């Protein structure tokens, strides 16, 4: 399992979009081949699937962000400033790729951002 995002949420994250780390763009090689966005499904702790989209700028620094169902996820989970979100990617033995998105509450049983 590879951790792609481990972030303490800010007001901007909750109201607009979630920044995606540039160093994790290797997960979506199609973005380096001229495409500016890619959609993927991420499962949460209760099994709900969220259709998320990673987009990059066409000029200058790519500044990747996650949109798609992101704001619906924020609302559904009642996320607040200071909450922690973790996005992971796993490849199983047959090469099947899956993504999981979790809150600190779902991971640790509390909302504390501290590990």
Image: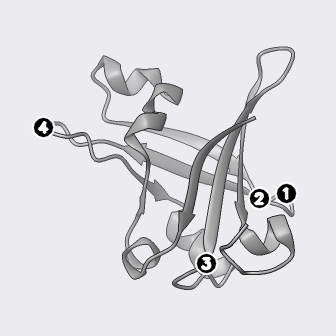
Left or right, 101 with reference to 24:
right
Residue 19 location (% of width, % of height): 40, 57
Label 2 sits on a secondary structure element that is: loop
Label 1 – label 2 distance at C-alpha: 5 Å
Does dot 1 land on a helix, a strand or a loop?
loop
Dot 1 and dot 2 residues touching (CB under 8 Å)? yes
User: Disc 4 and disc 2: Cα gap in Å?
Assistant: 33 Å
Query: Where residue 79 sits in the image (x, y, percent)?
Result: 61, 81
- The location of residue 115, given as percent across then percent down, is 73, 66
Q: Residue at x 30, y 42 (%)?
A: 56
* The quarter of the displayed image where residue 77 is located: bottom right
The residue to which callout 4 is attached is: 59
Residue hosting label 1: 47
Residue 44, disc:
2
Q: Answer yes or no: do the residues labelled 4 and 1 have beta carbons within 8 Å?
A: no
Whether tag 3 and tag 2 are in contact, CB under 8 A, the answer is no
Of labels 4 and 1, earlier in sequence is 1
Q: Residues within 10 Å of mark 4 (few under 14, many from 20)?
A: few
Q: Which residue is mark 3?
A: 83
Q: Which quarter shows the N terminus?
A: top right
Question: Residue 94 is drawn in which quadrant?
Answer: top right
Above or below for 5 versus 107: above
**Helix, strand or loop under label 4:** loop
Which residue does the image show at 51% across and 71% down from the upper left? 71
Mark 3 vs mark 1, CA separation in Å: 20 Å
- Counting residues from the start of the chain, the first of labels 3 and 1 encountered is 1
């Amino acid at each position: 399992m590879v951790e792609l995002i481990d972030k303490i949420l800010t007001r901007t994250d909750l109201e607009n979009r979630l920044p995606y780390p540039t160093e994790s763009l290797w997960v979506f090689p199609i973005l380096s081949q001229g495409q500016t966005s890619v959609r993927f499904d991420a499962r949460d702790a209760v099994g709900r699937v969220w259709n998320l989209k990673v987009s990059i700028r066409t000029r200058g620094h790519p500044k990747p962000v996650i949109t798609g169902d992101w704001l619906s996820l924020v609302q559904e989970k009642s996320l607040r400033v200071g909450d922690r979100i973790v996005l992971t990617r796993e490849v199983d033995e047959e090469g099947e790729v899956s993504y999981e998105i979790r809150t600190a509450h779902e991971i640790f049983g509390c909302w504390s951002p501290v590990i």
